[in-house]
């Protein structure tokens, strides 16, 4: 709780909710990764559990603000349109620039970090 995020949580400036991607997997073993297409070492994340998790989080945001979506196709409410979805990537390209942090300082914005 001595970290920046811990202090922000304690001061009720942010709320952090964790979701287990395995909860959104549809196979018997709840797998969220698979072998890479070309073979070789390493694994890749399956997109299906990620998409289901993001849709569930967006729906949870809508429920919290009283804008329950009728289906996953109608999740575009005023709040979800302002939600930033951040996906970390192991690629060598670095997208973090001086401009990027200013994009995250908009008040009352929701973030989904994957």
Image (spheres, rainbow, N blue to C red):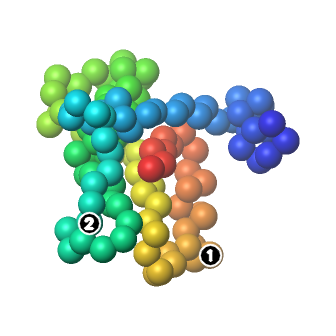
> In x, y percent, where is residue 79?
38, 37
Residue at the image position 45 percent from the left and 33 percent from the top: 19
Q: Is residue 62 above or below residue 95?
A: above
Report the mark closest to the observer, 1 or 2.
2
Location of residue 97 (image quadrant): bottom right
SS at circle 2? loop
Seen from the viewer's position, the closer of residues 28 and 44 is 28
Residue in the image at 54% along x and 31% along y: 17
Vertical relation: 98 (above or below) 70: below
Asked whether residue 89 appears in the rendered view, the answer is yes
Mark 2, Cα crowd under 10 Å, few <14 / some 14-19 / many 20+, is: few
Q: Residue at x 54, y 39 (%)?
A: 108
Q: Which mark is residue 2?
A: none
Residue farthest to the front, as pictured? 40
Tell me which residue sits at (23%, 25%) in the image. Answer: 69
Instruction: Give left or right: position of 53 versus 69.
Output: right
Q: Which mark is residue 98?
A: 1
Instruction: Decide which of tag 1 and tag 2 comes sooner along the chain.
Output: 2
Disc 1 secondary structure class:
loop
Please give left or right for residue 40 compared with residue 17 in the image. Answer: left
Q: Which is nearer the eye, 38 or 69?
A: 38
Q: Please state the total of marks drawn on the protein image.
A: 2
Image coordinates of residue 41 in percent, x first then y, are 36, 71
Residue 63, x across and y down, in percent: 36, 20
Residue annotated with mark 2: 36
| Residue 71 location, quadrant | top left
| 19 relative to 96, above or below | above
Q: Name the quarter where the N terminus is drawn.
A: top right
Q: Is residue 79 visible?
A: no
Q: CA distance from mark 1 to mark 2?
A: 34 Å
């Amino acid at each position: 709780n001595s970290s920046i995020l811990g202090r922000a949580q304690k001061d009720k400036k942010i709320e952090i909710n964790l979701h287990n991607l395995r909860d959104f997997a549809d196979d018997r073993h709840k797998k969220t990764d698979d072998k890479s297409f070309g073979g070789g070492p390493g694994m890749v994340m399956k997109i299906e559990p990620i998409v289901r998790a993001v849709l569930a989080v967006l729906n949870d945001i809508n429920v919290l603000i009283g804008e329950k979506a009728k289906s996953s196709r109608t999740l575009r409410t005023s709040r979800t349109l302002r939600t930033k979805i951040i996906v970390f990537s192991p690629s060598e390209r670095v997208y973090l620039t001086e401009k990027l942090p200013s994009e995250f300082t908009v008040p009352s914005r929701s973030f989904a970090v994957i």
